[in-house]
Amino acid sequence: MLVLPLGLGTKLRRWPIVTVMIGLVWLIAFFVDHSDQRIANGLVASVGRTGMRDAARRLFVEYCTSHKGKSDSCHRYAQLIWTGFPAKTPSGLLQAGAAQSKIPAYELQPLHVQASMQLGGLAGGGASAEIKRAEVLREELRDCGSSKTCFQYKEMIWSFLGDHLDRALPSVVHLPSFRQYDLAQHDYLNLLHRLCVANDCLMPGQIGLKALMLAQIRHGGVYHLLANLFALLLFGIYVEQRGSRLVYFGALVAGGTIGMAAYTAFFGTQDTIVLGGSAIVSAVMGMFYVFFFNTKLRFLVWLPRKIYAGTRFSADMRYAFPLFFLLSDIVGGLDSGFADLATHKVAHVAHLIAFAFGMLAAYVIGRWRAVPAPLIYEAEARVVHDLTYTRNLPRLFSETTRLLSWNPENIAVRELTCSAALRSSVLSRQEVPQPLRHQAHVFLVEHLATVCAVNARQGGFRFICQLLTRVPIWLPLSEYLGRLGALNILKVADFALGQAHMILAFRLYDLYLMRFPLSVNARVVEASAAEAVAHLTSTKETILDVESYLRSHPQSLLAPRLAAWLTNSDRRSA
Amino acid sequence: MNPFTQLATVSNLLKVPPRRTLASALGDDFSLYGPAGFILRWYALTIDLVMFAPIHMLIRVSMSQYLERLVAHGQSGRAFAWSFFAFLIPVLVYFVIPTWRSGQTLGKRIVGIRVITAARQPALTLADTLRREVLGKAASIALCGAGFLLMRGSPRKRALHDYLGKTMVISYAAGPSPAK
């Protein structure tokens, strides 16, 4: 079972140049710029040169034993601190193998937690063995169950890993090796800072414009890049259609920059190196949510039934989007890594900030360049506005088809074209060319029921009546309203009756009885229609309408009653 | 001023509230809709689980540290009670309340199916909904999914939780069927 979002799933009205260009820049930067490898190597070198790993482990052992931990266990669990990094090297050079390492898929994360997990596979044999031992320990601590001792160690490791770089725990400050650790940490942070200055990377204390821009272009690994590219293309291509490309570009860069800067300044630990385009993606997602709030999100579900292609569904954007995308970031932001000791992989807070900025930007753009609710693109509004004044039916049909391929929810253009097709009596006039008449017929078959259903839901019964009274009397309504629900048919018929559109009301009741003869309501509807026939006023127009209706639909269920009424009215007039 | 804001559909200008007549007296006839099949309901459940998981995680993650501490300190009973509570809240918010109010969860709405009473009435009681969504589904799962498979042999495609909640599920995506 897999659920994959597909964005709006509609055709694009123009090439998403800005989105594609950003994706290309990311790709080029990934293949050309190897700063992530330089940073990773520099980081390993810094840890080795300053003896940070040994100092931290010594401090942890003292911290652990001072909290009633057994010395053996404390030494054992100390391997979880800076796992895979080299011990202090006298020459300051890296250990064999570690120089070849790189940090593959980290993004916006504290290096001392994540890099330590990922270096092992690429580092030398000793480090690799240490990584394996650390994995066993991590698994051991994952579910402590009812073991109080296990939980105590877990809590100690977690608080030590989470806090020791930024805020020295009060119980740590007085430990004998704290001074040595403090010096090592100072040296390490200095080296890291210098490394970042040399490579223009983004970290607390080094938040410059250049670093911010470069950080949004660089990615930590191929999966990181592909995930961001997928999300950017999925949402960006639609957001770019909404209006000006320049405004779109400005908003997404501003959103990404603010998200990254705010995270680095207020939420990152001192050795957090921030990189990746996900803040940009989050800003795009924020805009996508606001711009297309009233539309539907399409997604693909794979189940064994159609494993080869999946099945497409549409969901209301307003509910589905937060549940699909936003909540996972909120959950990630809440997860302090306690449960499995290492979930600091992604800077969820940076995503949330960028998302909020994207929403705000979209709201401002929406106020500045407003588009009426059923429409979603500015260009769409412009075309609909132009079409309002056209009398050229072929153009109307082709433009409507084009508009609906961009936005299937566009009810305004459906209403416009249905009205024009019915108003021009294209279906009845013999001089109209057959292809055009056929085109109008097909359009009405496809869209009239939808127009009626949407208007019935919104209370636009008068408009529905205006449309339906123009359907030629010889045409059965079932041709066009085949997909209209039973309740909607009754609602429109009720309204028509109330507005003295008697023939339309009878046609609709007839439609109901023909389509749903086995409904439990059929008898009541028939009785009600019969009563309405009995109260029909005998005017010349009504008689003519009834006569022509009976001529065209002699098989209708109300035909006998209408025929009886006609005979009676003839007698009365005689 | 932006010219697009001037665009108003004809229907917006002609909105009139419907009169309360035949349609409002009769309501929708749910006997016109066929029962939803196993595959369609599986789709709905899949989508529901994808949507439900983050809500559950939101509550669960925020309580995880506390729960672990309770278990470690030998208060398993209390931890179990809190875990159950952490699970029940999203179940109520996502499954029970929407089903009770509208007969649909988000997944069901997307797929186009709806829960109604076995007597084909739209209004479910809270007790029936709780029996269906909490007790019934727990029973269906506890029987290794056999409760769900029951619908394949049932004439109105009712699963175990449908029988317990005196409900059935109809498919309305294709519109009412003219013949039953």
Image (cartoon, rainbow, N blue to C red):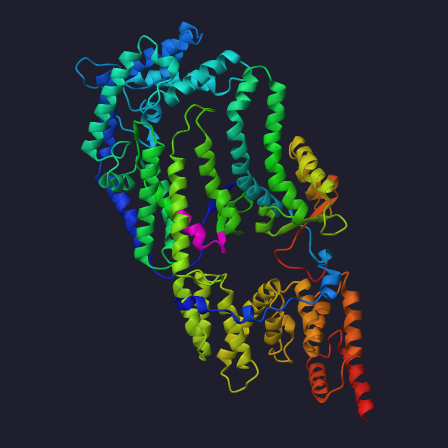
The vertical placement of A371 against A38, above or below, is below
Question: Which residue, as the protein is rendered here, is positioned at the far left?
Answer: A91
Q: Which of A560 and A143 is in front in this view?
A: A143
Residue A25, how many percent across, how many down? 26, 46
Residue B95, how many percent across, how many down? 62, 41
Q: Which residue is drawn at 74% across and 66% down?
A: B22
Asked whether, in this view, residue A53 is left or right of residue A459, the answer is left
Asked whether, in this view, residue A277 is left or right of residue B60, the answer is left
The vertical placement of A232 against B74, above or below, is below
Q: Which residue is drawn at 61% across and 52% down?
A: B112
Question: Which residue, as the protein is rendered here, is positioned at the far top?
Answer: A71
Residue B15, visible in the rendered structure:
yes
Q: Which of A133 and B19 is in front in this view?
A: B19
Q: How many numbered circles are shown?
A: 0
Q: Quadrant of residue A106?
A: top left
Residue A423, how many percent across, how many down? 54, 80
Asked whether, in this view, residue A367 is left or right of residue A460, the answer is left
Stretch of the chain drawn in magenta:
A285-297
Q: Classify the position of the C terminus of chain A by image quarter.
A: bottom right
Q: Residue at x 27, y 44 (%)?
A: A27
